[in-house]
Image (spheres, rainbow, N blue to C red):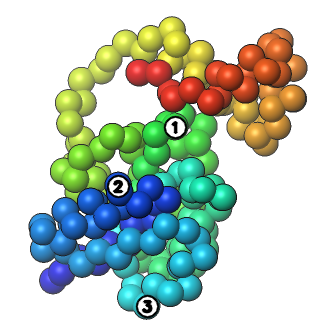
Amino acid sequence: MTLRYLIVDDDEHFGRVLCRSLERSGAEATFIRSPDELKDVSHAPQRIILDLRLEHSSGLDLISPMKQRWPDASIIVLTGYASIPTAVEAVKRGADNYLHKPATLQDLISTFEGRPVGDQQAEVMSVDRMEWEHIQRVLNENDGNISATARALNMHRRTLQRKLQKYAPR
């Protein structure tokens, strides 16, 4: 049986490369760049790879409609902006898992199959990473409101905005 994948990512290069890699492994793969293109997907995917941050929307907002349309599909949210609150939110909305970019094709397949990804040894979180996680949790608690989050963190709003524009530290 050939597995059918749907890739939703606004990064054209990444999406095309991932699509070709999946096809070379024997799967069928469809790549779309925006939520507007979902209506054009004619097949029912078994596995969906969904980017968290799309150009004009959040991948989180697509999880429920995708689960309604394709209830048997497994969804992995893939992002370069990983945080514990967004991972929890993605799973609450129906995603099966959450991976941080860069993820290899083998990482994705392993995650869909419920196997451990890469080197699963426990590692100590850096201070920068702990700060990032804390900011993301407070931001989530304030429904994404930057001003309310800055007040809760006792931080200037512009400082918080600069921190949020950076990639998540390792």
Which of the pair 164/140 is nearer the observer? 164
Amino acid residing under circle 3: Ser
Q: Earlier in the sequence, mark 1 or mark 2?
A: 2
Horizontal relation, residue 118 to residue 79: left or right: left
The label shown at residue 14 is 2
Residue 138's x, y, as percent? 72, 28
Horizontal relation, residue 50 to residue 115: left or right: right
**Residue for badge 1:** 81
- The residue that appears at 39% across and 66% down in the rendered structure is 7
- The residue that appears at 20% across and 36% down in the rendered structure is 118
Tell me if I can see residue 96 in this picture: no
The answer to whether marks 3 and 2 mark residues whose Cβ atoms lie closer than 8 Å is no
Which residue is most to the left?
A: 25
Amino acid residing under circle 1: Tyr
In 3D space, how far apart are the residues under numbered discs 3 and 2 (Cα atoms)?
A: 22 Å
Secondary-structure class at tag 1 = loop
Which of the pair 7/129 is nearer the observer? 7
